[in-house]
Amino acid sequence: MLRNIYIKEMKDSFRDRRTLLLTVFLPIIMMSVLTIFYESLISTDEGQTFTLAIESSISVEEESLLTDYANIEIVKADDPAAIVREGEAQAALLLSPSFFTRIENGENASVTLIGDSFSQNSSTLMGIVTNILTSFEKTIITERLIAQGTDPSIIEPFTIEQQESSGENPNVNLLAMLIPLILALAIGIGASPAAADLFAGEKEKKTMEALLMTPVNRTTMLFAKWLTITSIGSIIGIITLIVVALEIAFFTEHLKAAVSFNNQAGMIIGIAVAISIVYAMFCASLLMLTSIIGKTVKEAQSYSTPVMMLSMFPVMFLSSVGINELAFEHFAIPILNLFSLLKELLFGVVDYQHVFITIGSNLICIIIIFIIGRILFKKDKWVMN
Amino acid sequence: MIEIQEVTKKFKDKKVSITALKHVSFSIEKGQTVGLLGENGAGKTTLLRTIATLLSPTEGYITVDGMDTVKNPDAIKKKIGVLFGGETGLYDRLTARENLDFFATLYGMSKHETKVRIDDLAKMFGMRDYLDRKVGGFSKGMRQKVAISRTLIHNPDIILFDEPTTGLDITSSNVFRELIHQLKREGKTMLFSSHIMEEVSMLCDSVAMMHKGELVYHGNLEELYQSEKSNDLNYIFMSKLVRGETDYAS
């Protein structure tokens, strides 16, 4: 009986164009846009040229400080700050009058750098120019110390070397935030129309009464409908993962280099698929509840929208947390654990304890939600309008 | 046989208790066709839903062929077919055949039984031309025929109709009336609510009149006409309601 109801519900759901559109096309479009966007974001610094405005009155010697850098294009103007304000240059460099003469004479000279720290391009250019000037400053100090017969190393008592503890490409962190977000949203959005239709929709169309008039156990009906929502969510999750894997493998260079699972690729993909299915089950349980409570499809969707928005919060919690800082609670709280586990997996870390905590906590929540759903579905108030 | 004994049904809506049925008692003999009359909100649909085991009585009990509706809902569901009014309760994205096939499997019918029954119903209602088309594109009359077929798919002994001809054109209403005659010939027990007095007068052996959740009359139609000295059911119904109101006032 369960099989008969399940097959009918799947057939009915997939004949709905909304389900078909959200199941197949939404993940492909969302993931394609995401992949292209992040690939371009990662590769922006390479080969990009920035425009720096300087005063027309600057000397050839002063200009030579900047001419050796291929990614800086110099624009001369009487008012370089105005050029920046107009957006024709990303930053402006103003040197005090007779800049080089004053330095040669041992007098104090000043540099003013004008830019927009809210603009990524402007910030990058200001960083490049600051590095050039710092390097130039060090050269002058070294020359002055040597002229005075002092060892230049006296002003550099130690050197600082910064190393990444994870040893992984930092670009993966970006993906580790966005892949779970898109996955969670795709599963929630994709399964939502079918969920609303299977309970609230059936109440609205009075097919629920016809269904309840058959000698089929209500728990069987409930389980078949939950299984249908879960199946649709799982299909969306798997399609999303396949699309992102194929696009990274065949259409990107930097993302492909960043994500490297070595010999664990099969295991990582398997766990990612399993956790997507578990999340689809959890999501289906929540959507089932909102649909039982809703008297109409519209009402059910009003209830499910804020529930689906919950899937956006983990990004805020986890964006500043490193994989070595992920603790029990990150894997014990549903939705948050999808993000935590996928973050670990994208960094190539497979921790079975975390996998079991994630699956276990989701299953406990699913059982609790299912019991609540069963109690509601047995009451006349919630199954008939 | 359906026996309704002192049935009261109360609903709670935002802490307010609404009594939809008040101590309703009457019985329907096997093979009888009973018309259920009453204004909107009289409790007709609640009574039909309670007989159909979809609702449980707050007080009293209902038995169908000796089985209590609360204790034996599954056994009763196999004996009853229900067609609720308004929406026809069909899946728009499935074909008429798929709709009937689905409900047949839920009643535990075999594939062969289902095929034979669908063919019979398609012949009876002239549905062969559109049996394999999706229900979403059907006219109201076509939908109603499929819905009636769904009600009859498991060949139930007892059939409950809730305002079945509401919104139907003359041709579809006549098809329905012809069906009732046929089902009467087959010895089916039927209870149907209606606003159309001529329909009830034409099809029913007896009537049950309801007003504000109470049964104001139940009895044989012929006896009713004789006692009221009129053959106008509409007039009799209205006078019963007026008397009912006077009784409440006193």
Image (cartoon, helix red, strand yellow):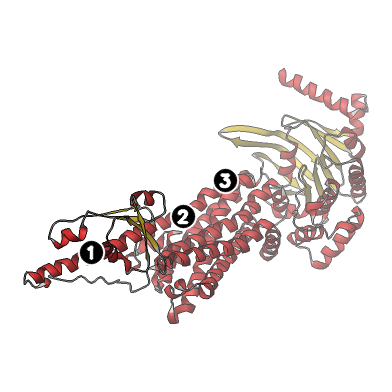
Residue in front for this viewpoint, B214 or A339 = A339
Image coordinates of residue A243 in percent, x first then y, are 56, 69
- Circle number at residue A312: 2
Subunit that carries the residue with mark 1: A
Q: Tell me whether marks 2 and 3 sit on the same chain.
A: yes
Position of the C terminus of chain A by quadrant: top right
Q: Which mark is residue A195?
A: none
* Location of residue A221 by image quarter: bottom right
Dot 1 alpha-carbon crowd within 10 angstroms: few under 14, some 14 to 19, many 20 or more:
few
Residue contact at pointers 2 and 1, CB within 8 angstroms: no
Sequence-earlier tag: 2 or 3 = 3
Residue A46 place in picture, x, y as percent: 41, 69
Residue projecting furthest to the left: A149
Q: Is residue A154 visible?
A: no
Which chain does the numbered disc 3 sit on? Answer: A
Residue at image mark 3? A302
Label 1 secondary element: helix
Work out how far the residue at label 2 is from the one at label 3, CA to CA, in angstroms. 17 Å
Left or right, B167 with reference to A44:
right
Q: Tag 2: residue type?
A: Met
Residue B157 versus residue A238: which sits nearer the camera? Answer: A238
Q: Judge if badges 1 and 3 mark residues of a common chain.
A: yes
Q: Residue B199 placed where, x, y %?
A: 89, 37
